[in-house]
Amino acid sequence: MKLLMIYSEKFAYKTNIKNLESAKKYEEEKQIENTLVGFIQVEQKDEEDISKVETKMIKNLKWAAKKNDTNNIVLHSFAHLSMSKADEGITKELFDRAEQRLKNSGYEVSQTPFGYFLDLDVQAPGKSLARVFKEF
């Protein structure tokens, strides 16, 4: 897994192009303030022990959220961090489980539309720990 975490004072998106046949067709536009955005690339090797990968991802997201003094987390599938990609169904299930686990821990969590290219607006401050990359 590749995980790029960016703390954003403002994170906004709008659906643009549907890029997965299995994705539901809809339009969405949303803006979230004071949030940690996880740009997440689930890789094929992660399928071997997806629960271990899920736990590491959640721990890293919680850590970075705490360091940036936010309770908001956005999960964003970002299949541009590696050439290796996990099955889309496994990736979506991982996101759904992670969202529920984070909510159960008291976080406000949302996911960007899965299977879409999005127009993004990211306003991230230039401070320590506002951008963190992890690979596991």
Image: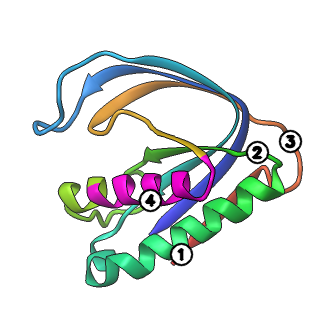
Find out whether the residues at labels 2 and 1 contact each other: C-beta distance under 8 Å.
no
Disc 3 on helix, strand or loop? loop
Residue for badge 1: 56
The residue located at (63%, 53%) in the rendering is 5
> Magenta includes 96?
yes
Task: Give the number of the mark in front: 1 or 4.
Answer: 4
Q: CA distance from mark 2 to mark 1?
A: 19 Å
Of pointers 1 and 4, the one earlier in the residue sequence: 1
Taking depth in this image into account, of 52 and 107 the one nearest to the observer is 107
Magenta stretch: give its range.
93-107
Of pointers 3 and 4, the one earlier in the residue sequence: 4
Q: CA distance from mark 1 to mark 4?
A: 10 Å
Q: Amino acid at mark 3?
A: Gly
Task: Determine which of the numbered discs, if any, sits on residue 70 in the image.
Answer: 2
> Magenta includes 84?
no
Disc 4 on helix, strand or loop? helix
Q: Position of residue 53 (x, y in %)?
A: 43, 76
Task: Give the number of the mark in front: 3 or 2.
Answer: 2
Q: CA distance from mark 3 to mark 2?
A: 16 Å
Task: Give the number of the mark in front: 3 or 4.
Answer: 4
In this view, 22 is above or below 3: above
Residue for badge 3: 126
Task: Give the number of the mark in front: 1 or 3.
Answer: 1
